Image: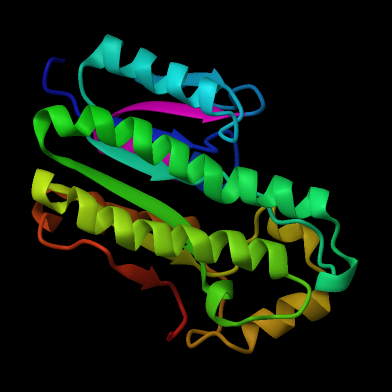
């Protein structure tokens, strides 16, 4: 339909990104998802592209294709990310740091830049970037991951100021620990170290995340920008 809202979701083939894609489809969005691997969804109004968000050329081509096909992007959710195995900073290789920053931060930066350019034409849009409560915990063994997600938070706050005059909001959902393929890299001791910092003593669910995304994505949230919503944790 002509007025059907359009959402871009990165990392949509699994975990949080897949859950958010399903949720927005249920809310009437046409969803364009991407991941490095093939699609794991076969739903009406869902289109998938295989690409690496760390490759700026691939990102540009993807977003341009959506813009040409739909003429609009209403909501962007940057969910693509990686969590390297827990390693003390002095034992973490530069290759691991570069790959983590490339996926978690550069990917978010590039998709935001391309999607915001499309949003500017209608002077409206909602950008939601996913971070983690780990940025405030400073846990040993997660230096590359926390650095990359802290960069996402800082970037989002700057972008929120830059895009506010155009009616585009930029907010962050700092996700608590969830049972996903990404968190499977953590051993039980590491999980308990996270859990002891939770204000609400349970793992987050996809419903918790979708509720936060829905709030920021709402047309009624046009006066809320540059905010970080922590799930289950008091910053």
| Residue 138, percent from left and from top | 64, 81
Bounds of the magenta segment:
20-35
* Residue 82 rendering spot, x and y as whole percentages: 67, 50
In the image, residue 160 above or below residue 66: below
Q: Is 90 situated left or right of 140 in this image?
A: right
**Number of callouts:** 0
Residue found 69% across the figure and 80% down from its top = 139
Q: Is residue 174 above or below residue 122?
A: below
- Whether 134 is drawn above or below 113: the answer is below
Residue at image position (26%, 31%) is 117
Colour convention of the picture:
rainbow
Q: Is residue 166 magenta?
A: no
**24 inside magenta stretch:** yes
Left or right of 212 in this view: 86: right
Front residue of 53 and 180: 53
Which residue corresponds to the image point at 32% horizontal and 62% vertical from the top-left?
Answer: 157
Which quadrant is the C terminus positioned in?
A: bottom left
Image coordinates of residue 111 in percent, x first then y, are 43, 36
Question: Can the viewer see residue 114?
Answer: yes
């Amino acid at each position: 339909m002509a007025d059907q809202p359009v959402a871009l979701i990165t990392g949509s083939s699994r975990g949080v990104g897949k859950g958010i894609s399903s949720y927005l489809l249920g809310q009437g969005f046409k969803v364009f998802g991407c991941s490095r691997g093939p699609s794991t969804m076969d739903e009406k109004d869902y289109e998938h592209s295989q690409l690496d968000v760390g490759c700026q050329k691939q990102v540009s081509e993807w977003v341009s294709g959506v813009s040409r096909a739909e003429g609009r992007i209403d909501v962007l959710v940057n969910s693509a990310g990686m969590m390297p195995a827990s390693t003390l900073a002095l034992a973490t290789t530069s290759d691991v740091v570069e790959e983590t920053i490339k996926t978690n931060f550069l990917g978010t930066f590039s998709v935001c830049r391309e999607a915001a350019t499309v949003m500017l034409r209608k002077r409206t849009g909602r950008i939601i970037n996913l971070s983690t409560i780990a940025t405030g915990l400073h846990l040993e063994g997660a230096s590359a991951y926390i650095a990359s997600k802290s960069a996402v938070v800082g970037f989002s706050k700057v972008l929120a100021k830059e895009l506010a005059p155009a009616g585009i909001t930029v907010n962050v959902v700092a996700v608590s620990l969830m049972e996903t393929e990404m968190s499977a890299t953590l051993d039980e001791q590491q999980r308990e170290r996270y859990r002891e910092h939770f204000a609400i003593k349970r793992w987050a669910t996809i419903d918790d995340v979708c509720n936060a995304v829905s709030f920021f994505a709402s047309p009624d949230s046009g006066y809320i920008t540059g905010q970080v919503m922590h799930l289950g944790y008091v910053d």
